[in-house]
Image (cartoon, rainbow, N blue to C red):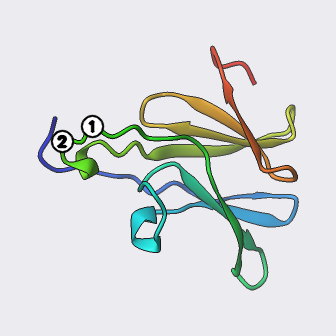
Amino acid sequence: MNKKRVGVKKVEPVVFQNVCYKVISGAKARGLEQNGGYIGAYDINSDDELWHLKIYDVVYNKEMEADKQDVLITKMSISSLRGGIVIENEKGRKFLVNPETKKVRELFLGIF
């Protein structure tokens, strides 16, 4: 593994049903259990956080440095077909978030 994570790209927020969804960077600093895999829902007018959600678990090997094992979100998009937000991570896994129920399900084979 690389000593340092290089070129972490900012993931653009998406707006769905008048709520702005953003990747939460450095989630551990906020007291959450892992750095990657969280999104936040924000009021489109005030930018106040409405809620946050863990999209997937990161399993850490205690023998290695945790920051080298973080799995970050790399892309967010709206799926009008499924009525939710599609999240993709560094490992190529895709998830569909239903913002109303806050339920997350993994998408397989790129099926939306």
Residue at the far left in the pictured view? 3
Q: Residues within 10 Å of mark 2 (few under 14, many from 20)?
A: few
Dividing the picture into quadrants, the one containing residue 105 is top right
73 relative position to 84: left or right: left
What percent of the width, then of the height, locates residue 88? 56, 37
Q: Residue at x 43, y 41 (%)?
A: 58
List the residue tagged with mark 2.
Answer: 64
Dividing the picture into quadrants, the one containing residue 19 is bottom right
Q: Residue at x 51, y 54 (%)?
A: 11
9 relative position to 74: left or right: left
Q: Residue at x 46, y 70 (%)?
A: 31
Q: Secondary structure at mark 2?
A: loop
What percent of the width, then of the height, locates residue 102? 78, 50
Residue at the far top in the pictured view? 109
What percent of the width, then of the height, locates residue 76? 62, 46
Disc marking residue 107: none
Report, in whole angstroms, how far the alpha carbon at label 1 lies from the one at label 2.
6 Å
Q: Secondary structure at mark 1?
A: loop
Q: Is residue 31 above or below residue 62?
A: below
Disc marking residue 61: 1
Q: Nearer the viewer, residue 97 or 66?
A: 66
**Quadrant in which the N terminus appears:** top left
Q: Residue at x 35, y 46 (%)?
A: 70
**Quadrant in which the C terminus appears:** top right
What percent of the width, then of the height, locates residue 80? 85, 39
| Label pair 1/2, CB-CB below 8 angstroms | yes
**Tag 1: amino acid:** Asn
**Tag 2: amino acid:** Met
Q: Is residue 85 above or below residue 92?
A: below
